[in-house]
Amino acid sequence: MSIKVVLVAGARPNFMKIAPLWVEMNRFPSNFTPILLHTGQHYDYEMSRVFFEDLDLPEPDYFLGVGSGTHAEQTAGIMIEFEKVLQKERPDLVMVVGDVNSTLACSVTAKKLLIPIAHVEAGLRSFDMTMPEEINRKVTDTISDILFTPSMDANKNLVLEGVDGNKIHFVGNIMIDSLVKVLKRIDESYENKIYNKFSVKRGNFVLVTLHRPSNVDDKNNLLKILNVLNDLSRNVPIIFPVHPRTKKNINGLEKNSVFNEEFKIVEPLGYREFITLEKAPRFVLTDSGGIQEEATYLKIPCMTLRPNTERPITITEGTNELVSIETIKEKIESIVLGNWKQSKIPDLWDGKTAERIINILKELEHLEIGQTT
């Protein structure tokens, strides 16, 4: 008997995690009836359309259009609208991914309606409760019935928190599924097109993404970061696809006009376009969790401008290192001198995570999925 599954996506990083699940479920129509739901947490559907096209996702069955707001406003808005969908569809399972407000809001709403929850990318911890994402992760994992983890440190975190081991399944990194797929769609002519668009050469530019409040909401911190990047751009071009909140804060800085022309602050990019650039920079500077993972798979040096990471495997096994505003220059010198560390691709980061998840769900199907709490 086919089980009805609502797949929840909120912010743009969620799309890369949902897409492989959607595709794999549709390979087994007798087992699964997937419903694609986009909460609209950060972007409306028109702004997200290029991501859907790059990932072969159809138009969502539901678009909640919640938009931005405070954490409380956004979470409450998603819960109100999502409850209506659940009452109409009465699904057998809700699948959430990652750690955004949509993840938390949809999990709590489903749980209160006694609908089982599966959390993909469970068990990640930064151990920093000042991060909203850490709260979202911990609450979602606590109430989820099935927990799919990307790495063994995530399993350890869940066990230490008292989660029943029977609920935990190490399946690998779902982000890599989408990455492997899109890499096959990037040929030399497309690469050249993107390099020409930004007037850069392969291996001779830096890719930057920054969006976390600690980096971009404090204008003094943001200005320090921008000045470091501006200085760097005199030696190597920088491409900085800018998050809307970051852009707003940059535009509010009086010294915006003094940026070097090789410091290229550009609009958000589509997925295939961004991965084309991420394949071949000199290094990446980011505060994004997903980009830490992608850079590790691509074996690109990655500096994460944060005091911690919920993805420590990208440091212990991958290409990632944590940096501060004060240490960026020193780390850049290490990369230029060729002294960056050796790395490897972590276990099960192989593009087959969705396949493993779907196989587990098929096994659990006859056990009344999630009815363990």
Image: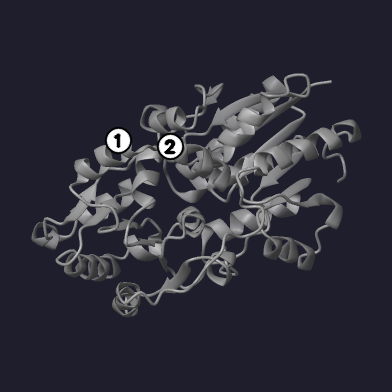
How is the rendered protein coloured? one colour
- Give the residue at x 35% y 40%: 273
The crowd level at tag 2 (other Cα within 10 Å; few <14, some 14-19, many 20+) is some
Residue 270, can we see it? no
The crowd level at tag 1 (other Cα within 10 Å; few <14, some 14-19, many 20+) is few
- Give the residue at x 80% y 59%: 163
What is the number of callouts on the image? 2
The image position of residue 120, as x and y in percent, is 66, 46
- Residue 113 falls in image quadrant: top right
Query: Which residue is label 2 attached to?
Result: 67
Compared with residue 59, is residue 20 higher up or lower down, i.e. above or below? below
| Horizontal side of residue 30 vs 252, given as left or right | right
Q: Which of 125 and 40 is in front in this view?
A: 125
Query: Which residue is label 1 attached to?
Result: 189
- Residue 135 falls in image quadrant: bottom right
Compared with residue 155, is residue 95 higher up or lower down, i.e. above or below? above
- Residue 156 falls in image quadrant: bottom right
